[in-house]
Amino acid sequence: MPHDDVTTPSVTTEQNNQEVLDVFGKHRDLASLPVTENDMPIGLINRAIFMSQMSKPYHRELYNRKSCIAFMDKEPLVVDAAMSIEALTFKAVEYGEKALADGFIIARDGRFLGIGHGLQLMRVVADMQAEKNRQIMHSIDYASTIQRSMLRPSREALARTLDDAGLVWEPRDVVGGDFYHFAAFEDGWFAALADCTGHGVPGAFLTLISSSILTQAIEQRGPRDPGALLMAVNRGIKQMLGQLDGNDETPGSNDGMDAAFFWFDNASRRLAFAGAKSALFVLQPGDEEGEIVDGERMGVGYVDTDLDFTWQNRFVQTQPGSVVFVTTDGLIDQIGGPKEIAFGKRRIRETIRGSRHASAARINEAVLDQYRAWQGHHRRRDDLTFFCFRVQ
């Protein structure tokens, strides 16, 4: 509870307005003067209002010798010294501007103790909020360390396995709801990009859950059937979050992810792809337009996704020089440009086609440059994750 370290000036109901004038004259920084009766606070005299009244013609002659209650606010905010800052803040806001402008009386066991000031209260609250924010940001920064540690093995495996590939992962906030997974095997490699519900800390929590379920599914089923892995992750998320038919353990919970899972066979260069509200863009050598390979229009793990929903595998026969690009919707949905519309898939395809002879990393840079130019002054809407590789 904030209050002055020095004794707070006050007057009793037995004192008159001349004595109030004397107190205000002695304490020129005093905005309000508490009034007590038998040590019990009963009112508050606002300096500005009091001086305005007493400066009117003949008011001094009329009121000087009268009790100080004449210009007293009879319903000031009185709070107990044991009240927490949080409770006091809500109380002061509920009481209105008067409590912040005039101050409030502090009492203990009903007896006058001192006076608190609105500005002082706001400073204390601001300091407390700043400390809370500092602690929260420290926790979020540590959460970012955990999330990046989770993703590091995949990024390192990607760098070791593919000579011409690029990955962009940029959370909208310090932590994000997108994640990726990459694992190499003797006969090929598996990759996944996923966009979990939400951003920031809630989204990051879901990435840890979903990534863990995916890792277990690969260990149990192997990496070569992306559709089956999507089914396994769907069941895992629904069971983990209690999002099953007739289950009310987590009311209001409806979380999941959109994802692209794919397996690349080294010998045949055939790509097996399964998508949950995700698609691949494939640009073959000699193909000027490129091909969109769509996944299923059903997300993973959500309440309205059946427990046994089947994601079909799509197969793409690639060849040396083929470029494959996949992204979460943070890139596609960003609002910008002169008409303030979504960036869209068409601009992505045009940028890739225009950079088709560059490295995969350079293609990503070109896409990112176009994205940022399109975004302009608009707020970033979502996490940003996309992956490009060229078949060797």
Image (cartoon, rainbow, N blue to C red):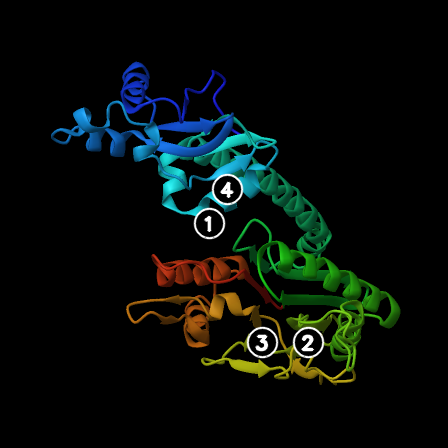
Q: Nearer the viewer, mark 4 or mark 3?
A: 4
In terms of sequence position, does the residue under pointer 4 or pointer 1 come before the other?
4
Provide residue 272's location: percent of width, then percent of height: 70, 78
Residue that carries the numbered disc 3 in the rendered image = 280
Rendered residue at 45%/71% (across/down): 348
Disc 3/disc 2 C-alpha distance (Å): 22 Å
Rendered residue at 27%/20% (across/down): 18
Residue that carries the numbered disc 1 in the rendered image = 94
Provide residue 233's location: percent of width, then percent of height: 76, 72
- Relative depth, front residue between 201 and 189: 201
Amino acid tagged 1: Glu
Local packing at callout 1 (Cα closer than 10 Å; few below 14, some 14-19, many 20+) is few
Local packing at callout 4 (Cα closer than 10 Å; few below 14, some 14-19, many 20+) is some
Q: Secondary structure at mark 3?
A: strand
Amino acid tagged 2: Tyr
Residue that carries the numbered disc 4 in the rendered image = 89
- Relative depth, front residue between 43 and 373: 43
Q: Nearer the viewer, mark 4 or mark 1?
A: 1
In terms of sequence position, does the residue under pointer 1 or pointer 3 come before the other?
1
Amino acid tagged 3: Leu
Q: Is residue 392 visible?
A: no
Q: Secondary structure at mark 2?
A: loop
